[in-house]
Image: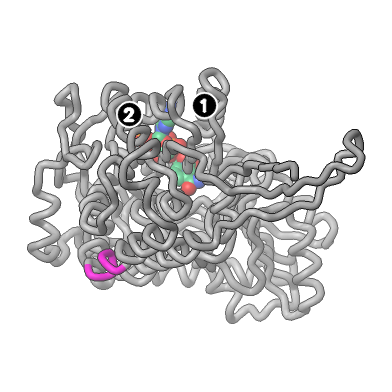
Amino acid sequence: MLLTTEAPAADSDTLAFIDREHKLLIDGDWVPAESGETIDVKNPADGETIATVAAGDKADIDKAVAAARRAFEGGEWPALTASERGRMLWKLADLIEEHLEEFAEIESLDNGKPRAVAAAADVPLAIDLFRYMAGWATKIEGTTIPISVPYMPGAEFHSYTLREPVGVVGQIIPWNFPLLMAAWKLGPALATGCTVVLKIAEETPLSGLRLGHLIQDAGFPDGVVNIVTGYGETAGAALAAHPDVDKVAFTGSTEVGKLIVKAAGETNLKKVSLELGGKSPNVILPDADLSTAIGGAANAIFFNHGQCCCAGSRLFVHKSQFDQVVEGVAEQAKQIKLGPGMHPETGMGPMVSQIQQDRVCGYLESGFAAGAQAVIGGKRAGGEGYFVEPTILVDTKPDMDVIQEEIFGPVVAAVPFEDPDELIAAANDSIYGLAAAVWTRDISKGHRIAKQLRAGTVWINCYNIFDAALPFGGYKQSGWGREMGHEAIDLYTQTKAVTLQF
Ligand code: NAP
Ligand code: MG
């Protein structure tokens, strides 16, 4: 199942960029970390170091926040019209599009994902997001409100609201969709007129740094976007705790999300939005079209090697069809070729890091120890790279870690059900509520179950459908707030009520 670890080389321009000395973008300049420390960046397909980036920490975050504050308070940025801000975002989208193949190669080498997938999904979604948000820049409106003021009979007023940018924003992103997560964060923040300090994941810093250069080329004034690479525990924690940051937006684990909330609460009560983990139920009803549901169930968990917050990691199938569906998904898993993302035949690349490979395999061991069985897969694969086989678990119990916790790897637990009411209770039996799906030919049933599932996204007869116009975010411990769609604008604006007495 594992292809060779050999793969075609990336384009020379891509390699030249990766080879550069990578610094931090602060106030329009590329500068080394104050400490002079660096972090090695690895290609997860073979464990080789492909670059080093600056290890920013608190001192660099302080500088970046000061730059973002200056850019927010005065100078060019606040003086731009909404239309000018929108045009800059559109220009940025055009520039990313011109470099689409380069971004796809960077993502593939740095994160491990198939180059073709990055070129078809990650990069175009990021481009679309920036264009969608470019349109919003000119459509951020307040309202006029008739007021009555009972204690001032006869007085006349004119009241209206303004939607204003929240200010200096700290953004912390993960490694599973490096460029796309940067886009989800930066797009709405820039459309609304905020300024940003972006902390990109230590595992996958390269596409965010490339984006930093294009942000400069697109004409954003100095200090509007500052990009800091560094560790979460130092740079990330300093950003979340910074007293001069007005809002922090975080995507990553629920565990770190709680630390972000704590840091915000202990300092300046900055606004917080969170996009966290998931353990999403994928439900196949007896009347589903299995010819699409089986492929859909495989895609739900194996896309991006299961390193998706919305991965369909709990597959519920009616008892009568359980064996048929499990065999079908196993057949799909068998067809997936594991290999380096740069290999044209690769269907699934490595986990992003050795830590992640160990984490996923640790969950598999815990599941086996508790009595679960692997129908297919169940272990690491290959030599130096961080590969894990696509895995289907059966014979699980509701209280097992593999059912309750986010594995963030290509591991699905298939669970049979009989009674439809019990199904809903089992599907909702999770601390998470990010996404869910139901497969059925009965349209009414599909919509009814969509209402019953406690999740921020429900797909009917499809999975992993994303669009810049669709809000995405979690119920329960999967997060606070919605990214994308017009709700993302709410995350980066605040309302001012203005009243004039005639
Ligand atoms: P993570 O620790 O939550 O990291 C996400 C981001 O937060 C990274 O930029 C990370 O920095 C930073 N960070 C880490 N500790 C921090 C802290 N104390 N204060 C501020 N920022 C901090 O996630 P991970 O280690 O990459 O993965 C662990 C698990 O998280 C995964 O197995 C998965 O279950 C979950 N996860 C969920 C998502 C999602 O999209 N919801 C994405 C990724 C991971 P560095 O990594 O650069 O040090
Ligand atoms: Mg980490």
Task: Give 34 or 206, whichever is nearer the viewer.
Answer: 34
| Rendering coords of residue 122 (x, y %) | 37, 63
Q: Is residue 95 magenta?
A: yes
Residue 163 appears anywhere in the view: yes
Amino acid type at circle 1 is Leu
The stretch of residues the image draws in magenta is 94-98
Q: Is residue 407 visible?
A: no
Query: Looking at the picture, does residue 185 appear above or below residue 344?
Result: above
Q: Earlier in the sequence, mark 2 or mark 1?
A: 2
Give the quarter of the image for residue 500: top right
The furthest residue to the front:
502
Choose between 143 and 270: the one closer to the eye. Answer: 143
Residue 328's disc number: none
Does residue 12 sit above or below 495 in this rendering? below
Kind of residue at badge 2:
Ala
Residue under circle 2?
Answer: 66
Which element is circle 2 on?
Answer: helix
The C terminus - image quarter: top right
Q: Residues within 10 Å of mark 2 (few under 14, many from 20)?
A: some
Whether disc 1's CB lies below 8 Å from ligand 1 is answered: yes
| Residue drawn at x 51%, y 26% as measured from the top left | 259
x, y percentage for residue 471?
A: 59, 59
Disc 2 versus disc 1: distance between alpha carbons?
23 Å
> Which residue in the structure is indicated by mark 1?
259
Q: Is residue 373 left or right of residue 192?
A: right
Residue 492 vs residue 175, the one in the foreground: 492
Q: Is 244 on the left-hand or right-hand side of 283?
A: left
Point out residue 432 in the picture as x, y percentages from the top left corner. Answer: 64, 44
Mark 2 vs mark 1: in front: 2
Q: Name the residue at 63% across, 78% down.
A: 290
The picture quadrant where one finds residue 394 is bottom right
